[in-house]
Amino acid sequence: MAATQAYVVPSFDSVRIDAPIRVELTTGRGVAASGEGPRATLDRIALSVSGRLLSIRMTPLRPGEKNAGSATLRLSTGDLRRLVMVGGGAVSVDRMKGLNGDIVVGGNGDVTVAAVEVDRLTVSLAGGGRVTLSGKAGAADIRLWGPGELAASGLAARTARVSNDGPGDMALTAITSADVRASGTGDVTVSGPAACTVANNGAGRVACGGESY
């Protein structure tokens, strides 16, 4: 039977996840944190806040101790401005809203944001993870280094600057203009009516504005 645990945390608008757990984050609410899963796993989850940054990690297993299984951490806060994922966890966010939004994935974790509503969005994906985005952004600056995937065809950016230097694939939508730089083996797909500037020096395929490069 799964156990539950409440955690006390102060206000935050940025999150760093360095733990192989599932995180569900809801915005537009008061600050709260609770976990569900095996008691031994919940006891290893450590939350700390420095400034406005909430850090989530897990203490190492003791010698001879076995992994008790996965846990889910449910968070709520007023706004989320920055999300950093390190390691192999998964996080789902209902909304990222405001002037700026920043998403950084450095491991094999999965990040999903159901509704992006920001003036400027920055995404950096360096590992083998997956970033899934829907919503809209005034300007999007997205860079992919590793074998990960950006699945953001449901994200409409007025202007987009895209760089793919690895084997991973990326897809998004641009409305006015798109500047695409590709030097890896992964594919880049930019849907929408944007005017495209493309420099494809890699082995992957670039599709933008209805043209292939």
Image (cartoon, helix red, strand yellow):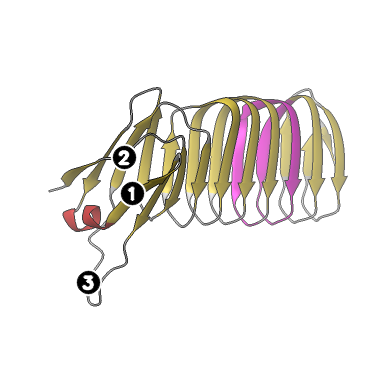
Q: Residue furthest bottom?
A: 63
Magenta stretch: includes residue 166:
yes
Q: Would you say 33 lies left or right of 56 here?
A: left
Q: Earlier in the sequence, mark 3 or mark 2?
A: 2
Name the residue located 57 percent from the left edge and 47 percent from the top edge.
104
Residue 65: mark in rendering: 3
Helix, strand or loop status at disc 1 = strand
Name the residue located 39 percent from the left edge and 55 percent from the top edge.
19
Please state which amino acid type lies under the numbered disc 1: Leu
Helix, strand or loop status at disc 3 = loop
Kindly report the distance in space between the C-alpha atoms of the residues bearing marks 3 and 2: 28 Å
Please state which amino acid type lies under the numbered disc 3: Glu
Kindly report the distance in space between the C-alpha atoms of the residues bearing marks 3 and 1: 21 Å
Residue 9: mark in rendering: 2
Kindly report the distance in space between the C-alpha atoms of the residues bearing marks 1 and 2: 8 Å
The residue nearer to you, when weighing 213 against 26, is 26
Residue 80, horizontal then vertical, whole percent: 48, 32
Pointer 1 residue: 47
Please state which amino acid type lies under the numbered disc 2: Val
Asked if 53 appears above or below 77 in the picture, the reply is below
Query: How dense is the environment of label 2, judged by Cα within 10 Å: few (below 14), some, or many (20 and up)?
Result: some
Name the residue located 32 percent from the left edge and 67 percent from the top edge.
60
The region drawn magenta spans: 146-174
Query: How dense is the environment of label 1, judged by Cα within 10 Å: few (below 14), some, or many (20 and up)?
Result: some
Helix, strand or loop status at disc 2 = loop
The residue nearer to you, when weighing 31 against 197, is 31
Asked whether the residues under the numbered discs 1 and 2 touch, taking CB atoms below 8 Å apart as contact, a structural biologist would say: yes
Name the residue located 44 percent from the left edge and 56 percent from the top edge.
88
Residue 135, horizontal then vertical, whole percent: 57, 24
Q: Earlier in the sequence, mark 3 or mark 1?
A: 1
Residue 53, horizontal then vertical, whole percent: 45, 43
